[in-house]
Amino acid sequence: MHLSWSLFISFLLFSCLIYSQENKQIQFKLLGQDDEMSFLSEKESKSVYEKLKWINLKNNNSLSFGGSYRFQAESFINENFNHQGAQDNIWYLNRILLHALFKINQKFDAYIELSSSTAIGKTNVSPVDKDLLAVNQAFAAYYFNSNWSLLLGRENLGFGSRRLVDVREGPNVRRSFDLARIDYKNETTKLTTFFAIPVKNKEGAFDNDYVKSSETFSGVYLSKNFHKYINFDIYGFYQKDDDVTYAIGTADEQRYTFGGRYFGSYKNVTFNNEAAYQLGLFGNNKINAYTLSLNAEYATKFIGNKTTIGLKTELISGDKNRNDNRLNTFDALYPRGAYFGRVARFGPSNLIDIHPYINTIYSKYYVEIDYDVFWRYSKNDGVYDAALFLQYPSTNTSAFIGHQIGTVTGFNFTNHLNIELETNIIIPGNFLKQNGATASLFHSVLTAEYKF
């Protein structure tokens, strides 16, 4: 059995490497259903890999296959900002995605994607580290015409710049929703309305529930493209969840989010600005929270390379007074699991951050260097982790959380294979130090991913 799999994978890798030398290549996207390979339908002479990848059927129907394997070696020193315990911890994360897409006459799609996520050597395994075998996506989509479509099933969901709704690509287990969605699109407009139930991941094989949770998520998302430097997103979300915990306590929550995004580019400048306001109820407390995110980049050349110099800053509200019957803590809903890098020590609640960075590309190599500095928005609220759980309660009046310095160095061997090393150092500020977190944290993760 192991020999058969080894021979199959070796054959597949060899076929992909031969294919990757050709001029026109498949464009792999974040989600397998979005991979761009339509040119294969008209290509007469296909390689062995292409014949396996895309199968033309009769009557304008097709069947395609694909997937990816990702390996990560991750390590911390002073993981909890202290010198206690073993400091030589390292663990290995493996993720396999396999999918099939059946298209019928450009009117109907049936898609299924299986996933296997494992963690080796990690002591405290979380739901985003391990899910032995699961249906990551399984949906059917019907296209009424070139504008309207209906999708039912399980899907990885993401909107806009993915600050509030993301597929959670950074961690080992992606985020799925059981949902129904209706989409409208034309050349300049895309409108999505949906009702979804988030999937609660479990560690075993095929043990995740279907359409079963006290938590629901629904909304409308509109994207309008007027020009390359005039683009708008407008959205409204509703989230209901039970037994949610913030610094003021635990209660059932109904939260509305209304926001907008203005993005585009002008000459060498690219910008991406977003604001959102939240209202609703947390137990008997009224919700009144907001966030503002500003991001600008300037493209230039540095020693002949393509270089981007950028600055991000975010204002994310926290609770002002735990006794005023109001909750001001912003909930980022379903954000990127690596919102501030794979080190993922701080989440997007009760934060002010300033984040300059520089990225450069040379041939197939790329390097990113960034610096981030964090403060608490409110001294009466704590600091939350990447999963938006309260990590450090408000036990002192210091606002300064700390400095974070990160690097990413990567190499794209082909459009199939990428290797990347990310490192981060977090130097604790007065707030963390007065919470007993006094040691600087060091983090690194080596990632190798092969898509086919």
Image (cartoon, helix red, strand yellow):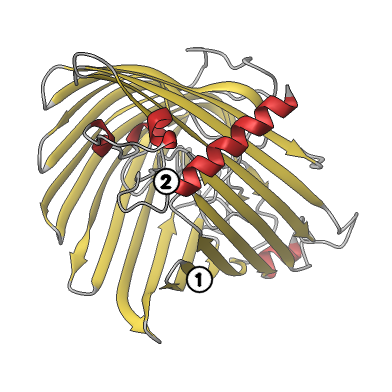
Considering only vertical position in the picture, is 88 above or below 242?
below
Structural crowding at the residue carrying mark 1, measured as other residues with C-alpha within 10 Å and reported as few (<14), some (14–19) or many (≥20): some
Which secondary structure lies at badge 1? strand
User: Taking the image as drawn, is residue 131 in sight?
Assistant: no
Considering only vertical position in the picture, is 338 above or below 125?
below
Asked if the residue at tag 2 contacts the one at tag 1, i.e. Cβ–Cβ closer than 8 Å, the answer is no
Q: Which residue is mark 2?
A: 19
- Could you tell me which residue is drawn at 11 percent across and 21 percent down? 145
Q: Is residue 231 left or right of residue 260?
A: left
Q: Find residue 330 and report its image quarter.
A: top left
| Location of residue 423 in the rendering, given as x and y in whole percent from the top left corner | 64, 65
- Could you tell me which residue is drawn at 30 percent across and 75 percent down? 299
Disc 2 marks which amino acid?
Tyr
Which secondary structure lies at badge 2? helix
Per the model, the C-alpha gap separating discs 1 and 2 is 27 Å
Q: Which residue is mark 1?
A: 367
Disc 1 marks which amino acid?
Val
Q: Nearer the viewer, residue 148 or 365?
A: 365
- Could you tell me which residue is drawn at 66 percent across and 48 percent down? 72
In the displayed image of the protein, which residue is found farthest to the bottom? Answer: 303
Give the foreground label among 1 and 2: 2
| Location of residue 294 in the rendering, given as x and y in whole percent from the top left corner | 33, 63
Q: Is residue 293 left or right of residue 348?
A: left
Structural crowding at the residue carrying mark 2, measured as other residues with C-alpha within 10 Å and reported as few (<14), some (14–19) or many (≥20): some
User: Taking the image as drawn, is residue 362 in sight?
Assistant: yes
